[in-house]
Amino acid sequence: MTAKPLRFCFALHLHQPWGNFDSVFEQHLTEVYRPLLRALMDGGCTPIAMHLSGPLLEWLDRHAPDFNDEIGEHAAAGRLELLCAGHDEPILAVLPRQDRVEQIARHRDWIRRRFGADARGLWLTERVWEPALPQELSAAGVNFVLVDDRHFRVSGFAPEQLHRHFITEDAGRRVNVFPIDERLRYLIPFRPPAELAEYLLALREAGHPLAVLGDDGEKFGGWPGTRKWLYEDGWLADFLDTMRSLRDRGDVVFTRFGDAIESTPSGGLAYLPSASYREMEGWALPVEPARAYLRLEDAWRERLAGVEGGLLRGGHWRHFLVKYPEGNRMHKVMLALSQTCRERGEPPGARRAIGRAQCNDAYWHGVFGGIYLPFLRHHVWASLAEAERTLRAGETATIESRDLDDDGTAEFWLHSRDASVLVAPARGGLVEMWIDTERRVNLLDVIARHPEAYHRPLQPTDAVAASATLTADGAPSIHDLESQLEAPPAIDSEPRGLFLDRIVAGGIGRDEFIAGTVRAARSWATIPMGAEWRLDPTSATIHLEGGGLTKVIDIGAPDRPGSIRARWTWDPSWCPADSWFTTELSASAPLWITAPDAERWDYDIETVAKSERGFQRTVQGHATVLRWPASRAHADVEVLAGGDAATAAGRDATGGPAR
């Protein structure tokens, strides 16, 4: 018997995050999205599926509505199957359940109003799956979802079982699930199309009914080297010729996902664990386990495609909220404001701002992911500030004691007329967040210099195994590109914020703070302090004691509403001779600092992070170290926001003079 044609479901995901620069949107539209869409449509490789994220769709409607018109025309003609997602491209699994449904419903409604299409298939952001998702997906009208074959393989499915769709459920709410073929993710567009044809024909001859590719559209000209590879070196033209030939011979049929459910047999019931794509699971691990994971991948190089490859697992997306406390703080403020928004009747402006703050890119880091990109974090904080200002308009100051970051200890969260301030008694009274709600900026939006697995030079056995063997006639994927630092960068061992207090020896100077090598005789970063607070209509005072230190923080004094003042007293008798009391202030926006009799050191907080274009050095903000002789027994600092904080956030920050 002649094998039936192989049905090929080909999905592209196009996304740019809230807060990205207009020039990046424009560049991708010109160099990637327009030429790719027209080449596929004109080349007869249809129908295909496409997901465009909410931030990208809204930008296109403002700046290039004709491109959205093209999308609509192809969708109406049946050449494009439009997929939905959470409108603001959130990680659905880490949202409140009501927010998951709201995000999907809003995206489906946007697509329906703009394109007249009913999008019932879901592009799962970063393919982060958790077993309870079918309830919300079904409630939001989703019929099918794309995940990775990885999700199935870690459940024990063999690779040869996965060329079909499956059904999963939770509490009786079911959805269809399509496994994305990892092999296809590396063949397209990084290998010659002849190899793709060979693979698709082998699937057909083996009797498999379906091949599924779902991947980022940006890899078709937006990733390093891919524009030359696709257009100048001819890969895209060769791909179109190859696929037309397979189609014309009856070997491969381009198929909508919705049609594939009807025309191909289901693989039956599948229950999938918490998972994402293979590379993401490695990025989510802590530093040393991440390095061990790379070594295991290298050692198992020839076995990754087999059953054993499914048994090698990395981490869980939620662990990014452990690796990066700054991302966790954004996430937990978002959760708190989302709950407040529901309690106060869902003001539309606040809900939209919270939705934008749920955009995933600023919460994690790998080759992609932007927690080290200040402009992405700034947009999240600006959206949260907008939501809080809307929700608390006309209210007097309030303060709450709650374990906001879920670390087992309570923080003080002050909400006033023009500020939202978080103080952590468990970390020595560190001020961790200072949102100017009028200017819509978190003045303390600084990420610490965290250690990363790639900071230390890799040994030869640590190289990541490529899923496709690279030869001279192929192009490397981002995941295959390796680069190394000549020397590890400075790393912070303690958190950043306002008023990180230490007793240090007299010989310690500015260089040790810059290098992150300060060895303090005592640091209050890990000393829990007892705390009490007093609230006035527009301000608050927090009194802290612990570890031999008394610390009083005044937030928004009546005569200086935009100020934070700290006062310290201590018994110098236990301090080492010739030691100094220091407090360090880290900020992402200009601050005017008044510190009587203090010596002052300043330096930029620079991180070194890996991206698709190699290592990037980024100034995250500015640090000011103030010091007094420990024998002095007291100190006093007042901080005011200075300059245009809204436009300076996320860029080089300079402190005001100490005087």
Image (tube, grey):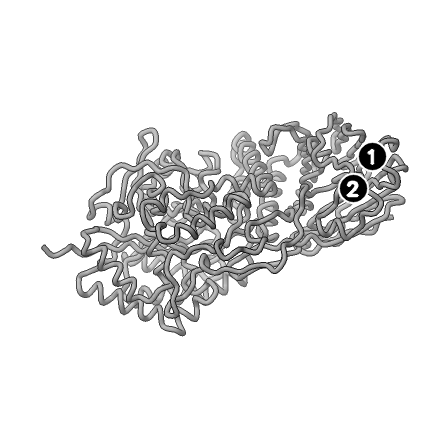
- Is residue 292 toward the left or the right of residue 553 in the image? left
Dot 2 crowding, Cα within 10 Å, few <14, some 14–19, many 20+ = many
Q: Amino acid at mark 1?
A: Trp
- Is residue 639 toward the left or the right of residue 285 in the image? right
- Is residue 78 toward the left or the right of residue 526 in the image? left
Residues at marks 2 and 1, CA–CA distance in whole angstroms: 10 Å
Direction left: furthest residue: 1
Measuring from the top left, give residue 538's x and y in whole percent: 74, 33
Measuring from the top left, give residue 133's x and y in whole percent: 39, 36
Residue in front for this viewpoint, 465 or 450 = 465
Quarter-of-image position of residue 480: bottom left
> Where the N terminus falls, by quadrant?
bottom left
Q: Mark 1 = which residue?
A: 568
Measuring from the top left, give residue 22's x and y in whole percent: 54, 60
Residue in front for this viewpoint, 520 or 331 = 520
Q: Amino acid at mark 2?
A: Thr
Q: Residue at x 66, y 31 (%)?
A: 411
Q: Secondary structure at mark 2?
A: strand
Measuring from the top left, give residue 157's x and y in whole percent: 30, 41
Residue in front for this viewpoint, 342 or 263 = 263
Q: What label does residue 480 carry, if any?
A: none
Residues at marks 2 and 1 touching, judged by CB atoms closer than 8 Å? yes
Dot 1 crowding, Cα within 10 Å, few <14, some 14–19, many 20+ = some
- Is residue 587 toward the left or the right of residue 387 in the image? right
Q: Mark 2 = which residue?
A: 583
Q: Residue at x 35, y 64 (%)?
A: 191
Direction bottom: furthest residue: 232
